[in-house]
Amino acid sequence: MRSQVKAHGFTLMELLVVLLIIGILSTVAIRTIDATRDRSLFDQTLKEMRELSYAMVGNPEITANGHRVDFGFYGDMMRLPNDLRELVENTSNSPNWRGPYLRREFLQDSVGYRYDAWGNPYTYNPATGTIATIGNGKYPMTIRVVDSIVHLTNNSIIGTVTDADNNPPGDKAATVGIYLYLPNGTTFFTRPDAGGYYEFTPATTNGGIPIGNHKLVARRPGGDSIVKWVTVVPRSRTVVDFRFSRLFRNYLQMVGTPKISGDSSGFTIWIVNPGENPDTVRTISFIEAPDSAYMRWLYIRNHEQRQWEYSPGVGRGDSLVIMPGPFVISPNGEEVVEFSFYNFSKTPSGGDTSNIYNQLFRLRFNDGSEFSVRPR
C-alpha cells in the first residue's frame, strides 16, 4: 500500500513577504539607476557649460611656446557674446568674428548647444558672465566664464624703451611712440618718459587692456620700429621692453673718478661729449640719493674756467631737478666740463653738512645720460 506525500503551498503571509522584498529591491534598483543617470547627465551638462565658457573667453590650457593662444570669442570681438547664438553665428555681421567658437563635436545639431543634458535651456547673462541651468530640478548649476567681468579688461602693459647701449631716451622721448593695436581695430598710443618708462593702464586707456593677443609697436624717426606680440591674460600686468638698434643720441660720458670735497659734503665729476653734435644740458636730476643728503650748491666749469653758481634751494636729493641756464658741451670730446655738487646737508632746512663719503648717487641729464657716483 502506497504512502501519500502531502504537497504544501505558500501561505499568504509568505507570498506577501516575498512581494515586499521584491518591491524593496526594485525601489533600490530604480533609485540607483536614477542616481547613476542623474550623475551622468550632470557630468555631461558640466562639460557642455565649460565648453561654452571656453568658446567665450578661451581655454587657458591651450598654449604655444609657453604662451596662451586661445581667447575665444572675446579675443576677437573684445566683448562677451550677447547670447549663445553668437558663438556659432555672426549675428552682428562683424568683420572681426572668426567663429564658430564651439568645437565641431559639440555642434551635432543646430540648437543642441543651447540646452543641457536634461533638455532644459541654458540661461546666459552677459552682464555677469554666468551660464546657468535648473539641471534635474533639485540642484541648479551655475558657472562663471571669468572670476570677475573686470578681469577681462582691467589689465596693464608696462615696459621700458632703450637704445643699443641700453640708454633711456632722455629729451628724445618725445620722438618715440608706442602703439597698441587691438583685434577690433582700437588703437592706443603713448610715449615713454625721459627714463624710458611707458605704460598702458586702466587709468590711461579708459578701462584697461582686454585679454587676448595684441600687437605692440615702438617707432622712432627714420623708419626705425620694433614689432612685438603681447599676450594679456586676466588680472595681469605684462612687461614688454623695447631696445632699438640705434642710439637715441650721442650720450655724454663721465671721465675720471668722482672726487669728494675736502669736508666730505660734496663731490665733483667730469663730463665729455664724445659725439658729433653739441649736447645742451638743461636739467640734472638726482634719481637716487641718500635720504640724509640735501644739496645746496651746483658749480659748472669748462676748460676756459668760466663759472656758473647756481643755488637750487635745499631739497631732497632724489627728487631735486637742477635747472641751470642751458649749457652747451662741444662735440668730439673737445671740452671737458666739471660739475660740482656742494653743501649736502643732513636736513631739508639746511644746518649741519652731511658726510657723503662712499654714498651712492645717480644723476640723470636731460638727454638721458645717467651716471652712478660714489664719492671717495
Image (cartoon, rainbow, N blue to C red):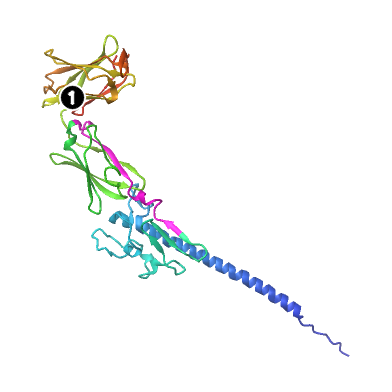
Give the percent coordinates (x, y) of residue 36: 54, 66
Q: Residue furthest front?
A: 349
Which residue is depicted at the point 49% across and 63% down? 42
Q: Is residue 164 inside the magenta stretch?
A: yes
Instruction: Determine the image quadrant of residue 48.
Output: bottom left
Left or right of 136 in this view: 279 = left
Task: Give the residue type that dot 1 points to.
Answer: Leu
Give the total number of marks visible in the rendering.
1
Q: Is residue 86 above or below residue 306?
A: below
Give the percent coordinates (x, y) of residue 225: 18, 42
Q: Residue furthest top?
A: 262
Give the percent coordinates (x, y) of residue 57: 35, 55
The secondary element bearing badge 1 is classed as loop
Q: Is residue 61 above or below residue 343?
A: below
Q: Which residues are magenta?
A: 142-170
Give the residue number, with chain letter if any, for mark 1: 252
Q: Give neighbour class at mark 1: few <14, some 14-19, many 20+ (Cα, 10 Å).
A: many
